[in-house]
Image (tube, grey):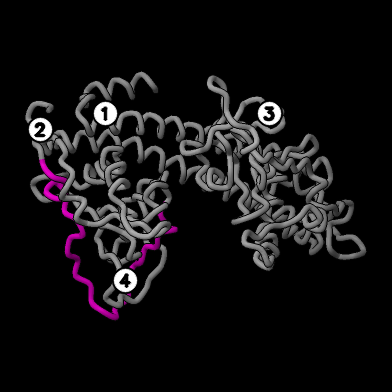
């Protein structure tokens, strides 16, 4: 045991399901299970609901730990951050609420302790119940003994890990801002045709450089659907939609393998829990950072991949183009996602999907080459910045996940962790 560390059962180190006073039939912020992103430290309320006296209750700074399979195995643990007005909230019945015990445990340290491998692995091993609906019993917290550092060291540990998570979150927010900005330009120019409508009305397009505005037509074609001189085509014309392989047919060798990128990995943009498959697949089926991945079945998502090298599984398209910028293809897919999801929802199968003819039937509008070139000069740097920041976050996540178990166990001291972080900068 590290010098000055104490030995406590987990229920004595942490406050499990602490009392939180809520008034029945009153509306409070609510957090459901799907709101928790395993790769994001904080969770906010997803909506407001009437409190009926059931479910979990928590306050600002409490940790929500999924007690049911497979949510816990998938890392659904987050720290609740309230809005400014209401500090208390309620949520899913499948949450165990964890809080630092006053005078014993720092609240942020309690979050990282809950996320640590020693606690998670133990809680998963204690699950009981019918297959597919197993849950962690609260009594399990009394049966695990841990070594706990002094409060001052807990705060230092939480400070280091928290700073990494804060930078990850800042990058995530910046990526969203960059994508929203790029999408707003795309929508204004190629969906709503704001510059064309303005010129058709004899006005200068608002906020647009006159030299750029001069490139846009001032009228629509005879159908009145697209700007004059532009063209209409199917989504599939923008590039190659490569369907993945049935990767279970490609077992890994001892020395060389790749993580399989399936729909589950697409949702998290991460391969840490992925199956291993052979690296001896066609190079066209190898996914790299910055690739566009589009799931054509299940939840139907489209992401700019930043989870590292991997193998493309069936039910996913890797979308590439030699004729159009990446952002142009990406935003047109996103434009049609609601329509595709509606089609998939109407399928009488367990997993809804779309087919290739739906890609052809989904129409895209192709502007003149000079307008596309100008748009690319503006939007492409935004997209490149998204990839750069996403990859930086992946590196920060790697460092955090490397340090967390060692700091929690005491095998690495705070000063040594700071040195590691400094060397990685």
Q: Which residue is mark 3?
A: 281
Q: Quote the CA–CA distance across marks 4 and 2.
A: 39 Å
Q: CA distance from mark 3 to mark 1?
A: 37 Å
Q: Residue at x 71, y 51 (%)?
A: 332
Label 2 secondary element: loop
Q: Position of residue 263 (x, y in %)?
A: 58, 47
**Is mark 1 in CB contact (under 8 Å) with mark 4?**
no
Which SS class for mark 1? helix
Looking at marks 3 and 4 on the same chain, the residue that comes earlier in the sequence is marked by: 4
Element type at marker 4? strand
Place of residue 338 in the rendered image (x, y in percent of width and height, measured from the top left): 65, 61
Q: Position of residue 252 (x, y in %)?
A: 57, 28
What residue is pinned by disc 2?
A: 5
The first of marks 1 and 2 along the sequence is 2
Mark 3 against mark 1, which lies toward the viewer?
3
Question: Mark 3 or 4, which is nearer the eye?
Answer: 3
Q: Earlier in the sequence, mark 3 or mark 1?
A: 3
The crowding category of the residue bearing disc 2, from other C-alpha atoms within 10 Å (few below 14, some 14 to 19, many at least 20), is some
Question: Which quadrant of the structure image shows residue 415?
Answer: top left
Report crowding for label 1: few under 14, some 14 to 19, many 20 or more residues within 10 A (C-alpha). Answer: some
């Amino acid at each position: 045991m590290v010098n000055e560390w104490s030995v406590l059962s987990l229920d004595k180190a942490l406050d499990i399901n602490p009392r939180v006073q809520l008034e029945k039939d009153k509306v409070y912020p609510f957090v459901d299970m799907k709101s928790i992103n395993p790769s994001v430290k904080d969770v906010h309320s997803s909506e407001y609901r009437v409190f009926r006296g059931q479910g979990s209750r928590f306050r600002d700074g409490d940790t929500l730990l999924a007690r049911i399979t497979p949510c816990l195995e998938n890392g659904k643990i987050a720290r609740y951050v309230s809005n400014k007005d209401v500090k208390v909230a309620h949520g899913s019945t499948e949450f165990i609420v964890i809080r630092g015990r006053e005078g014993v445990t720092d609240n942020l340290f309690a979050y990282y302790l809950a996320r640590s491998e020693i606690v998670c692995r133990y809680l998963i091993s204690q699950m009981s119940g019918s297959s597919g609906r197993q849950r962690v019993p609260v009594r399990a917290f009394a049966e695990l003994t841990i070594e706990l550092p002094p409060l001052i060291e807990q705060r230092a540990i939480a400070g280091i890990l928290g700073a990494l998570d804060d930078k990850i979150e800042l990058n995530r927010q910046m990526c969203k801002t960059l994508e929203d900005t790029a999408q707003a330009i795309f929508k204004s120019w190629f969906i709503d045709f704001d510059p064309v409508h303005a010129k058709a009305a004899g006005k200068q397009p608002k906020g647009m450089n006159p030299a750029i505005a001069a490139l846009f037509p001032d009228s629509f074609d005879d159908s009145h659907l697209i700007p004059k001189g532009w063209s209409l085509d199917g989504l599939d014309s923008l590039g190659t939609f490569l369907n993945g392989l049935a990767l279970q047919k490609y077992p890994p060798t001892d020395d060389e393998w790749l993580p399989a990128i399936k729909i589950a990995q697409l949702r998290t943009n991460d391969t840490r829990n992925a199956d291993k498959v052979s690296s001896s697949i066609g190079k066209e089926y190898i996914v790299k950072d910055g690739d566009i991945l589009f799931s054509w079945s299940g939840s139907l998502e489209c992401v700019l991949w930043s989870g590292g090298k991997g193998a493309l599984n069936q039910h996913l398209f890797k979308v590439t183009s030699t004729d159009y910028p990446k952002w142009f293809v990406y935003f047109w897919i996103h434009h049609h996602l609601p329509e595709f999801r509606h089609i998939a929802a109407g399928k009488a199968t367990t997993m809804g999907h779309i087919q290739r003819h739906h890609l052809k039937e989904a129409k895209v509008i192709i502007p003149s080459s000079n307008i596309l070139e100008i748009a690319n000069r503006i939007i492409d740097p935004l997209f490149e910045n998204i990839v750069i920041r996403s990859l930086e976050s992946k590196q920060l996540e790697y460092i955090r996940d490397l340090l967390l178990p060692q700091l929690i166990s005491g095998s690495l001291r705070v000063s040594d962790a700071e040195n590691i972080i400094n060397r990685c900068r």
